[in-house]
Image: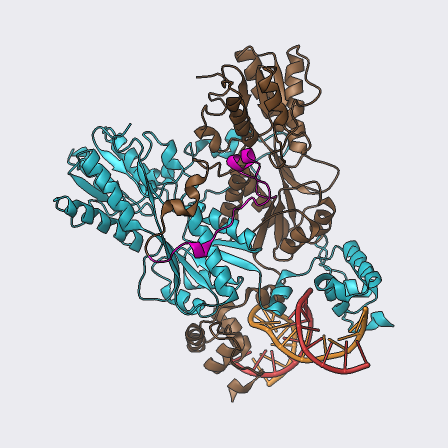
Chain colours: A cyan, B brown, C red, D orange
Amino acid sequence: MAGETTERPREGSGEPGAVRRATVYDVARAAEVSIATVSFAFRRPDSVKPSTRERVLAAARALGYAPSGAARGLAAGRTGVFGLHSFDLILDHAQALAGEFDDPVPELDLDALAADGPISFDALGEAAWPDPRAYPLYVDEVQRGFELESRRLGREVLLSRGSSSATAVADTAGRVDGLAVFPTRDAPETLRTISRTMPVVLLSAAPSEDDHHRVLVDNMGGMQTLIAHLIDDHGIRDLGFVGSIEPSDAAERFRGMGLAMAERGLTPPEAPIDSSTLAERDSLARVAELAAQRRLPRALVCTNDQLALVTMEVLRGAGLDVPTDVAVTGFDGVLAGRLSTPTLTTVRQPMESMGRIAARILADEYAAPSKGPRRYRLGTRLEIRASCGCA
Amino acid sequence: MAGETTERPREGSGEPGAVRRATVYDVARAAEVSIATVSFAFRRPDSVKPSTRERVLAAARALGYAPSGAARGLAAGRTGVFGLHSFDLILDHAQALAGEFDDPVPELDLDALAADGPISFDALGEAAWPDPRAYPLYVDEVQRGFELESRRLGREVLLSRGSSSATAVADTAGRVDGLAVFPTRDAPETLRTISRTMPVVLLSAAPSEDDHHRVLVDNMGGMQTLIAHLIDDHGIRDLGFVGSIEPSDAAERFRGMGLAMAERGLTPPEAPIDSSTLAERDSLARVAELAAQRRLPRALVCTNDQLALVTMEVLRGAGLDVPTDVAVTGFDGVLAGRLSTPTLTTVRQPMESMGRIAARILADEYAAPSKGPRRYRLGTRLEIRASCGCA
DNA sequence: TTGTATGCGTTATCAA
DNA sequence: TTGATAACGCATACAA
């Protein structure tokens, strides 16, 4: 009989509850055809006689058959998925100020939540969060664009966040056809080897000697415009930079500030007045110290919005008014900056476009690898709000 | 020699550019060990002699070896990934008002963007978007919680958006160990069969006769509190409901409104005055019509924030003032409601918690399936802002 | 401690 | 039009 072909031993699953997934073999047996026919019925329905096809599909439905993505991926040599690897979640403001670093995501105690009757809103701990939440952050907005475009391209999206340790990135790389990465300094080698195998796009990483595709923004230009505003429109001549200039992005911004100052006859600072990142303890300690001594410059130019928002908190804590006593500016243009008091003057990046372009590069390169690295440098826009002293 | 074991035929890849991915076989050959040892070196490092392990890892590094997720998933019978399937992207306000439905995600013309020199911000089309973007929407905020908790649990997240057609959902199901879904009406059978195979959680779907795990909110209670505010604090006795009551969530909200009105001696409406959804053409046509005739009730209670925001646009277009002429309220508590003019009075759902709880349920059920369906109904919080007439 | 051999569930190539 | 069968790359039981 036809159904007796290529049989495999099959028994019921051991553990209760978890029913073994139906496979092509199960469907083939039920429909009395070969596994090839089952596969064809799904992938090339036209090459199967209608009556057979119907029989197969009916059997599949009855068995709750869902093709294994793993097996498909293995056999087909492609997964249909694009990956996005972001660096570790950044603390939110409240956490940063409270010095909570050990577990950026607080534990959720499910058992403590009674399951009968509504669980009170307050019991969920959401009420304790800063309001408005700082989200979406820079990464989230880029991610959104990546999702959007991937969907357009018929790709699913695999998200991974965490350290960019070799294994973490490689793990993700093993599941996708292409990978977009927010780079950190510790994984360049891994990325290089991965990119030999599949398209890799670096997001917001200034060009270096490597051959990666890149989507980045005009950090220098954006910063120059911002500084021009502070100096030319506000008459501020005393500017300090806040934040680490270690990431290449930040370095470009710092450089842009220096350039704009020099052009106007001012002496650029040699270094930031505070090289904090939010991911470390005692962030902004130097700012706090100078604030207490009332020795801050007239304007604090922060390397990104998040840092700027926390900086404003710190100044407020020290009894200083923004923008009256000190002007503060950010960089990125995240939503949180519109909700702060005062609202944050910043340089907006086209975050969604960055994500979308990254996905497009992956798709293009997957289809037909280009010779050299592709680079898109996107323009920014100055968002003048209240923290600089305007309106 | 040791290296000669279990060999497979191997040649260079056909197409240029795309280097064939290194496999265990390649690493094994390079390190002169068996493929089992390669696997052990990664998965059970302690059971491999240190010197051997080093040799293997070095070879792997040199070859740019990244284990295939597909093969791993197939062999291990688990993928390490949780899936989140959301319904189709909802249009943003501008699109909804402009009647653009055919392609919710506008095309990105990469070639039109010159790659030399910064691409101007305006050329990216982002400037044309509503500002602030309506994002993150309800789904996005739940998604964020899902990501957060999944990461805590050591799981990656596979995102899929789109129709909940049988194939789309099944496709995702084939790649994950558990699946959270924003349900629509057309895929219950698929979900049922999938849930025989792996844990499935439904988000914000009112209980029905099925056995799915669920995370939902207290829609009735939340709405009752809101209506109480409108009637008791504002003295409004003339209330209309806006939005389709087809989704079970919305039906509960409509019911809650009726209950609260009846308790106060008012006659609840029998139906919404406008049953629009944003996903259809001519949405809110009835509201516009009544607005033009000045026959709207004193307050419009909308089924969700997005609809409320668009409703406010429509009223403004008709020359009506919110809240002076008509009060408008929403439901969800998305960020956009804080940025609108006037700011939106709404009922906030603990969206992030919903996503987190969903991920936890998947993890728990994956580890040990429980007998019956698990349900968590979460409380809401009234967010009083300006659109009701307060402040 | 390391090697051999097999199964995992598809897809795709040949034959029939 | 359908069936037999060989990859696909890894994990793992079992042997050595």
**Rendering quarter of residue A200:** bottom left
Locate the C terminus of chain B by quadrant. Answer: top left
Q: Position of residue A85 (x, y in %)?
A: 45, 55
Please tell me whether residue A265 is drawn above or below residue A175 in the rendered image. above
Does residue A366 appear left or right of residue A53 in this picture? left
Please tell me whether residue D6 is drawn above or below residue B380 in the rendered image. below
Which residue is more in the foreground, A69 or B14?
A: B14
Q: Position of residue B64 (x, y in %)?
A: 44, 71
**Predominant SS of the magenta segment:** loop
Which residue is more in the foreground, A81 or A264?
A: A264
**Rendering quarter of residue B101:** top right
Does residue A371 appear left or right of residue A1 in this picture? left
Q: State which region is magenta.
A: B88-116
Please tell me whether residue A230 is drawn above or below residue B76 in the rendered image. above
Q: Position of residue A61 (x, y in %)?
A: 77, 54
Please tell me whether residue A276 is drawn above or below residue A232 in the rendered image. below
Residue B99 covered by magenta stretch:
yes
At x 66% / y 28%, what residue is drawn? Answer: B275
Q: Is residue B106 visible?
A: yes
